[in-house]
Image (cartoon, rainbow, N blue to C red):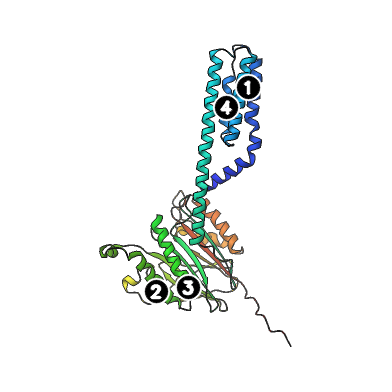
Amino acid sequence: MALRTWLDVWRSWRTGHAPALLVIPLALIVIVCVVDVLSPRDIHLGPLLVAAPALTVAFAGARTTAVVGALAVAAQVLIGVLRGVSGTANIQAQIAALIVVSAVCVTVCVVRGRHERQLHQVRSVAEAAQRVLLQPLPERAGPLQIAGLYIPAEQEAELGGDLYAAARTAHHSTRLLIGDVRGSGLGAISNTALLLGAFRAAAHRQATLPRLAVHLDGAFRWDTSQWRPQKEQDTAEDFATAMLLDIPDHDPVVHLISCGHPPPLILRGNRVIPLVAEASHLPIGFGGAFGTTEYDVQTFPFEVGDLLLLYTDGVIEARDADGRFYPFTERAPQWTADAPGELLRHLQDDLLAHVDARLNDDAAVVAIRRLASAPQPTAPAR
């Protein structure tokens, strides 16, 4: 499980159990006070009161910690009065030390709360940026049931170099894009936004799938090199592997163009059918540079009930502690009968368990099931 998930779990658990946990430091104050007063004069348990505010820091805020610290100081004063040693240097030193420890604990709570609020704000901005760039896939597109999964390699990251998108066309088909932009960090995020924007601007038009591939390659190559000197353009390595698909509503097939991307899988019952294209073109960003102006479209059967899986190399190249790759083609058929969203949840849990929650690369998966077409409405009889 990612670090952020553990933090969320701890924060929610701490919030829900704070009233019950508050009993521990309060009981400690009462016990220390009673035992110290009833003990012989040479036994002093008052120093143990510093544990009360120190424990409260773990689950409560600044105000509660301040109250517990004040109660601990009051208990120390009460002990000194009841034992008749309130004027001694020893008890006064203990009271002063307890005040200092309580003040430090309250300061820690204030600083922690400020950092948590800042982290929440940053995370909110990152989640909003992710929803804008990597928009959620529609649950239904014609006869297709769709779900998408994105797992960033960096634990606190929301965005990376993997991407997917879908668009409906006017001639009753669904077009999809899945890709993997080279690199990481802000450069990869910028190129991801560029490729997604180019796809969304053109995918819904009537242009053929090859013309869409040419458009994506040209837009990607132009935008990533327009401000660079000629020498840098010649050595630039901005590219993205991609798979373009067009799935018609009323024809049980899928048309695809592979641009250096791992082949999709068809899950048909217990069978796994890789859709290996006869011609795999250069990645997006390299096509025009090497004179590629035509893209070959491959067509494969995609029947009712079939489940189509698109994925990036972060899934198949994920390794466990012994260096073994994740057995994607062996695990995926276990959940063929599930809905796409449920399948991806099982797949995410299984993948993270395989790598012990430490991915070396971003991973993205899109699951698409073809359902029976809805019956067309008929005109009412006169």
Q: CA distance from mark 4 to mark 3?
A: 64 Å
Q: Earlier in the sequence, mark 1 or mark 2?
A: 1
Q: Earlier in the sequence, mark 4 or mark 3?
A: 4
Tag 3–tag 1 contact (CB < 8 Å): no
Vertically, is 208 above or below 15?
A: below
Q: Secondary structure at mark 3?
A: loop
Question: Label 2, on which residue?
Answer: 214
Vertically, is 32 above or below 239?
A: above
Picture disc at residue 32: 1
Residue 283 in percent (x, y) is at 38, 67
Tag 1–tag 4 contact (CB < 8 Å): no
Determine crowd level at label 1: few under 14, some 14-19, many 20+ residues with C-alpha closer than 10 A.
Answer: many
Q: The residue under label 2 is which amino acid type?
A: Val
Question: Label 4, on which residue?
Answer: 51
Q: The residue under label 1 is which amino acid type?
A: Val
Tag 3–tag 2 contact (CB < 8 Å): no
Q: CA distance from mark 1 to mark 4?
A: 11 Å
Q: Quadrant of residue 52?
A: top right
Q: Earlier in the sequence, mark 1 or mark 4?
A: 1
Q: Is residue 19 visible?
A: yes
Q: Quadrant of residue 347?
A: bottom right
- In the rendered image, the residue lying farthest to the bottom is 382
Q: Secondary structure at mark 2?
A: helix
Q: Earlier in the sequence, mark 3 or mark 1?
A: 1
Question: Label 3, on which residue?
Answer: 203
Q: How many marks?
A: 4
